[in-house]
Amino acid sequence: MSAINFEELKDRNQGKDKYVQPDFYGIDDLLTEEHILIRNSVRDYVKRELSPIIEEYAQKAEFPQHILKGLGEIGAFGPQLPAEYGCGGMDYITYGLIMQELERCDSGIRSTASVQGSLVMYPIYKFGSEEQKHKYLPKLAKGELMGCFGLTEPDHGSNPSGMTTNFKDMGDHYLLNGAKMWISNSPFADIAVVWAKNEEGKIRGIIVERGYEGFTTPETHGKWSLRASATGELVFDNVKVPKENLLPGVEGLKGPLTCLNSARYGISWGALGAAMDCYDSALRYSKERIQFGRPIGGFQLQQKKLAEMITEITKGQLLVWRLGNLMDAGKATPAQISMAKRNNVQIAKEIASEARQIHGGMGITGEYPLMRHMMNLESVITYEGTHDVHLLILGMEVTGENAFV
């Protein structure tokens, strides 16, 4: 892997990020001063530390691991979890805003934070013992430890109940066997929250630490999407896991699905950030690009594209703001989360494509973020519940009929 002088990259690209958030309906008026302060702090961090280097890392298909400490310092890891465990103690709207700002930069960066907070820290907080919470959460919040989430298998994606990864009770330890794939953060993760079946066939969560004999994390190469994110496998070959690493608070699919609800919520905000970045770039370009003696933003078809983009972004902003309030009140349903995730990722994909067209040929270059967002969103629309699966979740909610069986 080639070395990258990220300080040189930052110096070269500093100031190129001119992003201005679209807020057509005055959504900021619905936020508290604290919400805006934290969002703006994260935005400043992104502009200063991430925007100047993200394109080069994506081009090289490398994850910038040096940013992990900074992400911990700005509170990007588990901000919605209690302060007593070293976490942010913030509300779900704050969590959403942080995810929005990170994915405005790149989906892979948001994925890293989202996995850490919602799929590693959240299950330890929700289902772990007090000993597990105090052992892992403070270090995870700071980025001193990094984690990943092992659910998807080579033959079981949308049907996690069919998993074959399993563990057996060996008296003084468990013996874990199986494999997981498409795992964000796995190549550098210090721990993995793994979902596997016990000898009775019940799904349980278990914490696996790097260094356990027989536990390996091969990296996935050749991705056209999430190129600035580290993706890999989890392979378990007779891995001895201490019994105290079993999450005691849950069994069955409720465990991983509860975690996915938290992560999907973050995605609904994050994808909106990608959409806003594409719109902002397209709007600015439409005012600067001159054709036929005038800015292309003065032509009807370009205005149509931009008007439709800002309409969908505004609808998405209202959707996640309301969902955030429901999450804070403990009233959000899985179907409501599915609606927001499905809608906002889809409109982000469409906006990225339309924005690329406004940029013309320049839109395919790394000078602008459009193609990177377009490629990233192809993964976002698939992981943590595919576009079609979320459609069926909504269909079952409104009809009462289960189309999955």
Image (cartoon, helix red, strand yellow):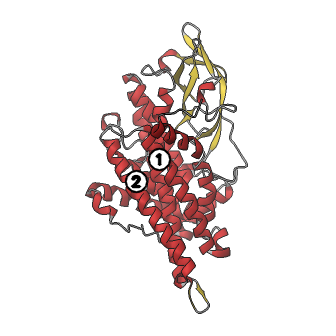
Whether residue 134 is visible here, answered yes or no, is: yes
Mark 2 residue element: helix
- Residue drawn at (64%, 57%) of the image: 375
> Residue 405, position in %: x, y?
60, 29
- Residue drawn at (42%, 40%) of the image: 141
Q: Does residue 169 sit above or below 38 in this rendering?
A: above
- Residue drawn at (60%, 24%) of the image: 212
Mark 1, other Cα within 10 Å: few <14 / some 14–19 / many ≥20: many
User: Could you say which is closer to the camera, residue 324 or residue 73?
Assistant: 324
Q: In the current view of this chain or complex, which residue is farthest to the bottom?
A: 293
Q: Amino acid at mark 1?
A: Met
Count of labels shown?
2
Q: Does residue 169 sit above or below 207 in this rendering?
A: above
Q: Does residue 391 sit above or below 321 in this rendering?
A: above
Name the mark on residue 319.
Answer: 2
Occupied quadrant, residue 376: bottom right
In this rendering, position of residue 133 left or right of residue 373: left
User: Could you say which is closer to the camera, residue 390 or residue 357?
Assistant: 390
> Residue 146, position in %: x, y?
51, 38
3D distance between C-alphas at marks 1 and 2: 9 Å
- Residue drawn at (26%, 58%) of the image: 33
Whether residue 48 is visible here, answered yes or no, is: no
Q: Amino acid at mark 2?
A: Leu
Q: In the current view of this chain or complex, which residue is farthest to the right?
A: 222
Say if mark 1 contacts mark 2, CB within 8 Å.
yes
Q: In the current view of this chain or complex, which residue is farthest to the left?
A: 33
Q: In the current view of this chain or complex, which residue is farthest to the top?
A: 171
In this rendering, position of residue 95 left or right of residue 270: left
Among numbered discs 1 and 2, the one appearing first in the sequence:
2
Mark 1 residue element: helix
> Residue 306, position in %: x, y?
51, 72
Residue, disc 1: 339
